[in-house]
């Protein structure tokens, strides 16, 4: 049912756009004015795409990434290396790794990270489901790809501790200096990690 014409349609749109992550007041204005200046068909396509994605996209029951069919494209791809699982925090991390075209195994999305400050422990994440996937012995390596921050490191340490007794190799994404970066601008943690994870040439 359409909203009554109370003269606040533009303000409501600005308010909703402003709730989106990374969208400040100026960006919200730019998007709102773009929509206003577009024809009705453009606005219809945008609203239809938003409603469709909410109706059709769900979590994959195996890895908890986004899926539009019963399972996600990765889990349903028989050519993927099923001996490796890359563990990430959020579905968007899967997309980031897939763009590199360097990894061809499976994924497992935790749905967050361990954060005592936010009252998030392992039981609030998809850890039990991960352990279930490791039970049959097919997986030989688990790659921990959580962010290199305090919560990500805490999560990786916890997972490493509970996975290793299963006889599965646990590895962590390397982190350090970005390509093209200057040493003088690197923070101490990044530079220290780069030194610790140095490799021979």
Image (spheres, helix red, strand yellow):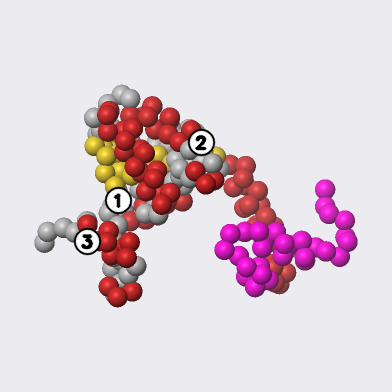
- Secondary structure beneath dot 2 equals helix
Say if the magenta span includes residue 55: no
Cα gap from disc 3 to disc 1, whole angstroms: 15 Å
Query: Measuring 66% from the left and 59% from the top, which residue is drawn there?
Result: 19
Question: Cα distance, mark 3 to mark 2?
Answer: 34 Å
Q: Earlier in the sequence, mark 3 or mark 2?
A: 2
Secondary structure found at label 1: loop
- Residue 56 placement (x, y as % from top left): 58, 42
Q: In the rendered structure, find residue 195 and report the number of the disc placed on it.
A: 3
Q: Is residue 185 above or below residue 125?
A: below
- Mark seen at residue 173: 1
Q: Residue furthest top?
A: 136
When asked about the image quadrant of residue 25, the answer is bottom right
**Where does the image place residue 22, in percent across and percent down from the top left?**
57, 63
Q: Is 9 inside the magenta-drawn segment? A: yes
Residue in front for this viewpoint, 197 or 33 = 197
The residue depicted at 51 percent of the width and 36 percent of the height is 124
Q: Which residues are magenta?
A: 1-30
Residue highlighted by disc 2: 124
**Residue 152, image x, y percentages:** 40, 49
Q: Is any part of residue 186 visible from this angle? A: yes
- Whether the residues at callouts 3 and 1 have beta carbons within 8 Å, the answer is no
């Amino acid at each position: 049912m359409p909203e009554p014409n109370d003269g606040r349609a533009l303000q409501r749109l600005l308010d909703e756009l402003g709730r989106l992550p990374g969208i400040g007041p100026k960006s919200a204005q730019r998007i709102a004015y773009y929509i206003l200046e577009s024809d009705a068909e453009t606005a219809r396509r945008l609203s239809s795409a938003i409603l469709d994605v909410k109706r059709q996209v769900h979590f994959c029951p195996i890895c908890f990434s986004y899926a539009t069919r019963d399972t996600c494209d990765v889990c349903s791809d028989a050519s993927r290396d099923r001996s490796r699982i890359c563990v990430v925090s959020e579905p968007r991390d899967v997309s980031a790794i897939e763009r590199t075209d360097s990894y061809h195994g499976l994924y497992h999305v935790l749905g967050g990270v361990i954060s005592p400050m936010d009252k998030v422990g392992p039981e609030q994440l998809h850890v039990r489901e991960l352990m279930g996937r490791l039970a049959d012995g097919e997986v030989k390596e688990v790659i921990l790809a959580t962010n290199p921050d305090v919560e990500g490191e805490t999560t990786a340490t916890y997972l490493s501790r509970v996975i290793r007794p299963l006889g599965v190799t646990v590895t962590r994404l390397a982190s350090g200096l970005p390509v093209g970066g200057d040493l003088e601008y690197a923070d101490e943690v990044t530079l220290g990690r780069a030194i610790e994870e140095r490799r021979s040439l």
